[in-house]
Image: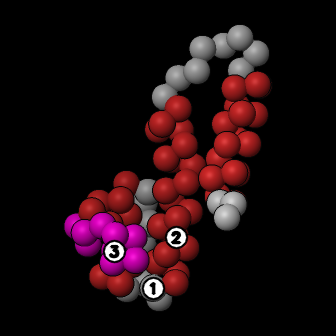
Amino acid sequence: MSNDLADCVRRSLNRYFRDLDGETPHAIYDMVIGCVEKPMLEVVLKQARGNQTVAAEMLGISRSTLRRKLAQYQLDQSS
């Protein structure tokens, strides 16, 4: 079974390397995580109706890790 998200990341990274035009790649891991993590948190929180405990369980991370990531991306933590 094809993984659409993985395929999207592969295509984007291949495009990134193609567009470097001889430049040295830098901080690829941080770039990819930064592009994926915030929207993932936003969608999961919406699916959890703002319940951080439920969102953390859905993500497979602790609630304290979720709260740290929400602060990192300046996402609403009022729920």
* Image: magenta residue range: 56-64
Residue 48 marker: 1
Q: Is residue 31 above or below residue 37?
A: above
Outermost residue toward the top?
22
Q: Position of residue 70 (x, y in %)?
A: 38, 64
Q: Is residue 66 visible?
A: yes
Give the quarter of the image for residue 50. bottom left
Above-or-below relation of 16 to 72? above
Question: Which residue position is annotated with label 3?
Answer: 56
SS type, badge 1: loop
Q: Is residue 79 visible?
A: no
Q: Which residue lies at the image location 67% right of the left edge and 43% below the top edge?
A: 10
Kind of residue at disc 2 = Glu
* Tag 3: amino acid: Ala
Disc 2 on helix, strand or loop? helix
- Residue 36 % position (x, y): 55, 54
Whether tag 1 and tag 2 are in contact, CB under 8 A, the answer is: no
Q: Is residue 53 left or right of residue 40?
A: left
Distance of label 3 from label 2 (alpha carbons): 12 Å
**Above or below for 48 versus 34:** below
Give the residue pinned by disc 2. Answer: 42
